[in-house]
Image (spheres, grey):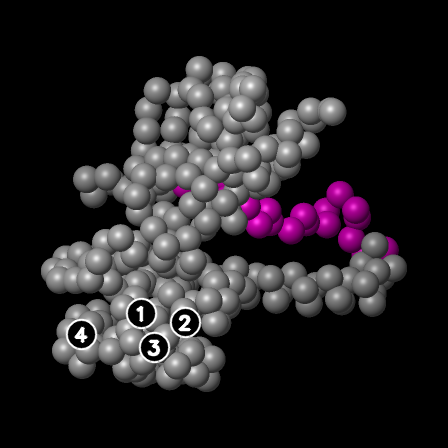
Amino acid sequence: MPDSAALRVLIVDDEPLGRRRVAALVRKESAVEIVGMIGDGVSAVEAIRSLSPDVVFLDVQMPGMSGLDVVRTIGPADMPTTVFVTAYDKHALTAFDLAAIDYLVKPFDDERFKEAFERARRMARLESADHLRDKLLAVLREEGSAKGKEVRAAVPPTRIPHPPSPFIERIPVESRGKVRFIPISDIDCIIASGPYAELVVGDRKHLIREAMQNLEDQLDPARFFRIHRSAIVRLDRVDALLKSPSGDCEVQLKSGVKIKVARSRREELEKRLGVRH
């Protein structure tokens, strides 16, 4: 989505007052277009597929098909940028693991909404940029395969650019109006903390509002591994595997921190670390 284009917003809530509340707040923002206001999950699925919104404000508790069911039906990978709206904070963890980049707990104030909206706007632009980049790379690869000999003859091999890495190298951390960028190479591990994630850098921790699944998808799997639902570790920071007679396992990082490994992840972790049986 180019910066100049209007952000296409879909609002899904089974309560008319809830829809109007979100719509009123959306209309206060610049460069937005409300493409639909939907009151049930089934219609929401149809609207997402037919209207292709950039951002969806999606109520979690709806009769019949809930907001979480909507995401499962569409598929997390195919969902637009999603902000869940819920009356119960307990739904937040499930929401984040599915597709949400943020969530609003009713009743929310204007400031909290604006924070979620701006985050959704930034994410929608990033996803659009990634999509356009991928399309361009696909075109270049196709053209390159058809004209490979001509390209090699015209451009010295040392000048052929490498495609950008699909994985992030820094993570922005907002605090008191200031945004710091934490290099991926500095992170020892990432620990889930409710709807937040803690970036552990030595003896310091940086709190960000981000889903573990989103972080896992953006990190290079050759460098990071999710050892548990609530923990991602940098592989070269692992100092030892601690095994117990009961079959439980922990990783000990070079910092001395110990983190439990889920039994379902242990075998893959050992492969990543080069453990031979």
The amino acid sitting under disc 2 is Val
- Where 229 falls versus 133 (above or below)? above
**Closer to viewer: mark 1 or mark 3:** 3
Q: Are marks 2 and 4 in contact (CB under 8 Å)?
A: no
Q: Which residue is mark 2?
A: 70
The reply, left or right, for residue 156 in relation to residue 233 is right
Q: What residue lies at 46% left-to-right and 67% top-to-bottom?
A: 72
- Where 65 falls versus 110 (above or below)? below
Main SS type for the magenta part? loop
Question: What number is the disc on residue 210?
Answer: none
Find the magenta span and give its range. Answer: 153-171
Q: Secondary structure at mark 4?
A: helix
Question: What number is the disc on residue 58?
Answer: 1
Q: Are marks 1 and 2 in contact (CB under 8 Å)?
A: yes
Q: Earlier in the sequence, mark 3 or mark 2?
A: 3
Task: Tell me the distance, in whole angstroms, between the alpha carbons under discs 1 and 3.
Answer: 14 Å
The amino acid sitting under disc 3 is Gly
Q: What residue lies at 24% left-to-right and 78% top-to-bottom?
A: 14
Q: What residue lies at 39% left-to-right and 35% top-to-bottom?
A: 191
The amino acid sitting under disc 4 is Gly
Q: Quadrant of the C terminus?
A: top right
Instruction: Specify few, some or many for label 2: CA neighbours under 10 Å numbering under 14, 14-19, or 20 or more.
Output: many
Question: What number is the disc on residue 18?
Answer: 4
